[in-house]
Image (cartoon, grey):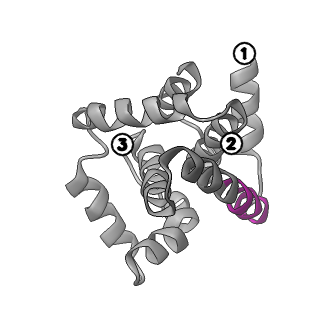
Amino acid sequence: MSEFDKLCKEFEKIDPATYLAFLAAKSKDVLAGMAAVTGDLASAVESYVDIVLMAVASDGKLSKDEYALIAPGLSAAVGEPISYDDAKKIMNKSKLNSRNNKAAVDALVDLVGSVSPEIKDDIVILTMIVCAADGKISGKEKAWIKQLIRE
């Protein structure tokens, strides 16, 4: 088993309270790092939301556990509560769960490649946290995370 797979297994075992604590800490670090690269907080927030949504969409489905993890951030981003069904509709409408998002993924990978190694590590950890929210990092999710690591 590779070190990457071992790390995925560790993230799959984390309890919900620890997920939320990790998510809060890594989100803060990622936003600060992205703001340093993009030059403004609004662009950093947009990039952060893209990272989270693409992580969720990487396996083509939004589980209720993934939704529970990202719902507070999504609600804050749009200024009102978003139901699970609405979040699924947003994901499907944006086609984040299809091969049509290649350009967006490529742009995100380029952005990840432009941040410091520490922030890149934080982004990878953030995506692993989001992908493991349902207790399993699928093969498709692992492949997506590896794209970020390779950049």
Is residue 85 depicted above or below 106 in this figure? Answer: below
* Magenta extent: 16-26
Residue 48 showing in the rendered view: yes
Give the quarter of the figure containing the N terminus: top right
Q: Is residue 8 left or right of residue 42?
A: right
- Identify the element where label 2 is drawn: helix
Q: Earlier in the sequence, mark 3 or mark 1?
A: 1
**Residue lying furthest front:** 39
Q: Which residue is mark 3?
A: 60
Q: Is residue 22 magenta?
A: yes
To which quarter of the image does residue 4 belong? top right
Q: Looking at the picture, which amino acid does disc 2 mark? A: Asp
Asked if the residue at tag 1 contacts the one at tag 3, i.e. Cβ–Cβ closer than 8 Å, the answer is: no
> Marks 3 and 2, Cα distance to the nearest angstrom?
23 Å
The structure residue drawn at horizontal position 32% and vertical position 62%, both measured from the top left corner, is: 88
Q: Which residue is mark 2?
A: 122
Q: Looking at the picture, which amino acid does disc 1 mark? A: Ser
